[in-house]
């Protein structure tokens, strides 16, 4: 459903961030994009929704050539790509519900969204999504009163409200503790399966990528140096992607305390079946 052919990006500064990227992503596939800092992961994700302009190649989403779009046709195409950000990108002074509804901005037009009047169906769907991501109790809380994990759940609900075909996810767990990171990755994975959504997830944590992705693509200096199953990601391949390191040394196990453990009243069992169920991790 998404096909990149010969995609390249050179920034005006002269930095070549991507070279000849060939990638095809079928419906429903969760792909993790790994690689060292500066490898081009964010650039690749942002070329797909044209937040960054590719300088070469073709990017097709179903039958639409994205690189040729501009103006309203580009805005329309962007609705089918939900973006989830590392820093959540929520508006702190707005409520959880208002933040989720801002996912409708591409649909309802400037004045209607400015006046914060959203269609009834959008509000009903936002309720359903907030329940699905485990936040039915937090609908009228201000975004700045939430924990990082809860903020990311709002970001996920907001991205889903626009009924995307593809999720572009940029370091979703970078600011989260290990247990909350797994909960968020599991949630993204489950939602992709439920909705047959494809996802590209830019992620630094290789263990998380291996655990939750169907496929891993390794970038190094703007080029794809690995494209395969999580089980194929050996120490040799990690060295190809990241450079020399003793990959087999096991780190001391970190104490895993989820930030959500500090909010025992936060969830109802029916609303968040897999994320709070004992032994789910
Ligand atoms: N706006 C920009 N202007 C100029 N060069 C840029 C810009 N953004 C990124 N680059 C360069 O492009 C290359 C790829 O950067 P990018 O941020 O895509 O890598 P990344 O793999 O996402 O890194 P990180 O994991 O640190 O976020 C780097 O050399 C970077 O310096």
Image: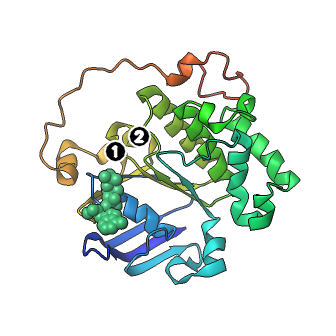
In this figure, which residue is indicated by the disc labeled 1? 204
| Percent x, y of residue 207 | 34, 37
Q: Can residue 174 be seen by looking at this rendering?
A: yes
Secondary structure category for the residue under label 2: loop
Q: Would you say 49 lies left or right of 79 here?
A: left
**Residue occupying the point 69% across, 54% down:** 102
Q: Would you say 154 lies left or right of 248 here?
A: right
Q: Is residue 235 above or below residue 27?
A: above
Eye-nearest disc, 1 or 2: 2
Q: Quadrant of ligand 1?
A: bottom left
Indicate yes or no: mark 1 CB to ligand 1 under 8 Å: yes
Secondary structure category for the residue under label 1: loop
C-alpha gap between disc 1 and disc 2: 8 Å
In this figure, which residue is indicated by the disc labeled 2? 174
Q: Would you say 9 lies left or right of 124 here?
A: left
Examine the image and state in which quarter residue 271 appears: top right
Q: Is residue 81 above or below residue 14?
A: above
């Amino acid at each position: 459903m998404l096909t990149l052919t010969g995609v390249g990006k050179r920034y005006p500064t002269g930095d070549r961030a991507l070279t000849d990227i060939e990638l095809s992503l079928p419906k429903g596939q969760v792909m993790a994009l790994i690689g060292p800092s500066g490898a081009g992961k964010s650039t690749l994700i942002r070329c797909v929704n044209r937040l960054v302009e590719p300088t070469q190649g073709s990017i097709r989403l179903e039958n639409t050539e994205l690189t040729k779009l501009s103006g309203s046709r580009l805005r329309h195409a962007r609705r089918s790509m939900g973006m989830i950000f590392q820093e959540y990108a929520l508006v702190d002074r707005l409520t959880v519900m208002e933040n989720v509804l801002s996912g409708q901005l591409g649909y309802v037009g400037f004045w209607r969204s400015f006046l914060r009047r959203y269609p009834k169906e959008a509000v009903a769907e936002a309720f359903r999504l907030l329940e699905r991501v485990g936040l039915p109790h937090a609908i009228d809380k201000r975004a700045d009163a939430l924990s990082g994990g809860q903020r990311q759940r709002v970001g996920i609900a907001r991205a889903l409200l626009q009924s995307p075909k593809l999720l572009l996810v940029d370091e979703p767990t970078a600011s989260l503790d290990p247990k909350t990171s797994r909960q968020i990755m599991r949630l993204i994975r489950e939602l992709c399966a439920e909705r047959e959504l494809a996802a590209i997830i830019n992620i630094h944590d290789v263990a998380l990528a291996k655990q939750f992705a169907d496929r891993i693509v390794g970038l190094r200096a703007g080029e794809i140096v690995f494209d395969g199953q999580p089980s194929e990601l050996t120490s040799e391949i990690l060295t190809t992607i990241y450079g020399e390191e003793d990959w087999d040394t096991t780190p001391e196990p970190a104490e895993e305390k989820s930030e959500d453990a500090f909010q025992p009243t936060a969830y109802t069992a029916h609303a968040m079946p897999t994320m709070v169920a004992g032994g789910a991790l």
